[in-house]
Amino acid sequence: MNKLFFFVTVAVLSINCLAVCSARMVHNLTTDQEALVDFKTRIISDPYNILVNNWSTNASICNWIGVSCSRKWQRVTALDFSNFGFSGTIAPHLGNLTFLGYLNISSNNFTGIIPLELSHLRRLKEIDMGSNNFTGVVPPWLGTIPELRHILLDKNSFSGSIPTSLLHNNSKLQTLQLAYNFLNGNIPQEIRNLSSLEYLNLQYNMLTGSIPFGIFNMSSLRELHLTNNSLSGWLPNDICDGIPELTVFSLSRNQLSGQIPSTIYNCRYLEVLSLSHNHFNGSIPSAIGSLNMLQQLSLGSNNFIGGIPLEIGNLSNLEKLSVSGLSQIGPIPSFIFNMSTLKLIQLVDNDMSGSLPVDIYLNLPKLVILDLHSNQFTGFIAFLEARSHAMLIYISHD
Ligand SMILES: *[C@@H]1O[C@H](CO)[C@@H](O)[C@H](O)[C@H]1NC(C)=O
Ligand SMILES: *[C@@H]1O[C@H](CO)[C@@H](O)[C@H](O)[C@H]1NC(C)=O
Ligand SMILES: *[C@@H]1O[C@H](CO)[C@@H](O)[C@H](O)[C@H]1NC(C)=O
Ligand SMILES: *[C@@H]1O[C@H](CO)[C@@H](O)[C@H](O)[C@H]1NC(C)=O
Ligand SMILES: *[C@@H]1O[C@H](CO)[C@@H](O)[C@H](O)[C@H]1NC(C)=O
Ligand SMILES: *[C@@H]1O[C@H](CO)[C@@H](O)[C@H](O)[C@H]1NC(C)=O
Ligand SMILES: *[C@@H]1O[C@H](CO)[C@@H](O)[C@H](O)[C@H]1NC(C)=O
Ligand SMILES: *[C@@H]1O[C@H](CO)[C@@H](O)[C@H](O)[C@H]1NC(C)=O
Ligand SMILES: *[C@@H]1O[C@H](CO)[C@@H](O)[C@H](O)[C@H]1NC(C)=O
Ligand SMILES: *[C@@H]1O[C@H](CO)[C@@H](O)[C@H](O)[C@H]1NC(C)=O
Ligand SMILES: *[C@@H]1O[C@H](CO)[C@@H](O)[C@H](O)[C@H]1NC(C)=O
Ligand SMILES: *[C@@H]1O[C@H](CO)[C@@H](O)[C@H](O)[C@H]1NC(C)=O
């Protein structure tokens, strides 16, 4: 028994040493240097002459602009090459930087795929490759990096679906930013397993299917951006019970239907609520009027019946109000002209008629844009033009 225990312990220790010791033997600052020199050779455009002026082969790589090293281990720990104007492809040798915790190459012109070798970066905590032109699939191996907290791959040309392996076990992930790509397929159910996720942005892709209800139980979620996809289905009745901290809720430009659940009032920290350009029906819930942190409210181009509820007038922090395509026959609800925080009012194509109050500027000192086109208003345009200051006014009769 004791002998067996001893044997097992020694065996485990030697396996550990094999892994750790060999890693030390294979990778040191010299191999980091080789990796960055390889990285350098694949950069084909360098408009700010960084390669020549700031990445001298004579100098230690730790003195290169954008490179940070750990003093203790003498290894590269962070790369920030954001906005360097580089184009080219990513050298697989970057995967040899085994002490790397932070990789930011956002806002360059890199192309090609993200090499599989980067999956060797086991200490990576943040990866930002946004605003480049990467192609291929979102790397599924990102889900195997244990400490990863922030993944930003937005504004590229990634295609395929969201890999479920990215979502299985990533309990530390706080940011998943995949907006402005060409992703298709459903949002995987497994997304609910990202138990620390605070920021989810999938907007401007081509995602289909319904929103997995599990998303509405991700209690750490602060921002949910799903605008401009092809999502369908409806919202759960207990929509905000499981995501009380939500501040941004953007579902515009999809094909969602059904009613807006009145339990929306449980998202009481909401600052942005954007539901426009969907097929929502029923009436606009008056409960929205109790979301008193709300700054932006966009509800237009749905199939709502009835008008804008009176309670909306209680939103004392509202800056942008956009409600279009209603069949609200009659004058503009007068409470809107008492909401002094408003900077933008967009009430387009609502069958509204009558005229605007004479004292419109008195109670709307911050108003910059007043967009009322495609309604039935009469007899006030000359008056508005005479009084207009720094305002953009769109009022046509069409
Ligand atoms: C790095 O390791 C290689 C062997 O893998 C060795 O030849 C070289 O001297 C080491 N360099 C430093 C700076 O330790
Ligand atoms: C890069 O090198 C050039 C020329 O030596 C220098 O003028 C510039 O300040 C350096 N850039 C940075 C960000 O240090
Ligand atoms: C690099 O070092 C070599 C000799 O060690 C020297 O001739 C050369 O001028 C140096 N280049 C720069 C850019 O400092
Ligand atoms: C990418 O390259 C194009 C020209 O090829 C250039 O106009 C653009 O500014 C570059 N973008 C970045 C972020 O460097
Ligand atoms: C570095 O990475 C490249 C490509 O992944 C590999 O071929 C090479 O063996 C690695 N070098 C070292 C010293 O680890
Ligand atoms: C990457 O760099 C950009 C530009 O400097 C910055 O805005 C962004 O926050 C950085 N990304 C991360 C994850 O730190
Ligand atoms: C991205 O690359 C594709 C080809 O791979 C090209 O057609 C497209 O214009 C590029 N986009 C940008 C913004 O550079
Ligand atoms: C999601 O997490 C639960 C535990 O929280 C686990 O039982 C389940 O297997 C995970 N699902 C996937 C697909 O990883
Ligand atoms: C999730 O992580 C646990 C340990 O943290 C591991 O045992 C399990 O195999 C992982 N599951 C998946 C699907 O990667
Ligand atoms: C959230 O989880 C609770 C308990 O697990 C469940 O009763 C509720 O239906 C879930 N809500 C959604 C929207 O999935
Ligand atoms: C999404 O955005 C693209 C490009 O901006 C646009 O062509 C497309 O019509 C939008 N889709 C929807 C559903 O609005
Ligand atoms: C809303 O639309 C759904 C179908 O999308 C329909 O079943 C429901 O009856 C509609 N409700 C109202 C109030 O129009």
Image: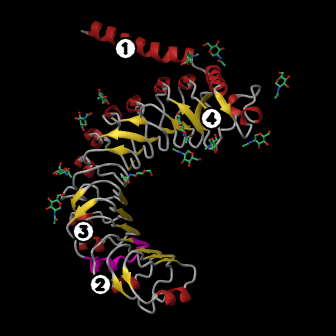
Image vertical order of residue 96 relative to residue 221, above or below: above
Residue 301 at x, y = what percent? 32, 65
Q: For residue 87, which numbered disc appears in the image?
A: 4
Q: For residue 330, which numbered disc appears in the image?
A: 2
In this rendering, would 116 be left or right of 93?
A: left
Q: CA distance from mark 3 to mark 1?
A: 66 Å
Instruction: Write the residue at 60% across / 40% down.
Output: 108
| Quarter of the figure with residue 107 | top right
From the viewer's perspective, is the residue at label 1 or at label 2 nearer? Answer: 2
Q: CA distance from mark 3 to mark 2?
A: 16 Å
Which comes before the other along the chain, label 1 or label 2?
A: 1
Mark 1 residue crowding within 10 angstroms, few (<14) / some (14–19) / many (20+): few
Image vertical order of residue 316 relative to residue 31, above or below: below
Which portion, as a residue range, is magenta?
A: 307-321
| Quarter of the figure with residue 84 | top right
Which comes before the other along the chain, label 2 or label 4?
A: 4
Mark 4 residue crowding within 10 angstroms, few (<14) / some (14–19) / many (20+): some
From the viewer's perspective, is the residue at label 2 or at label 4 nearer? Answer: 2
Mark 3 residue crowding within 10 angstroms, few (<14) / some (14–19) / many (20+): many
Residue on which disc 3 sits = 304
Residue 257 at x, y = what percent? 23, 57
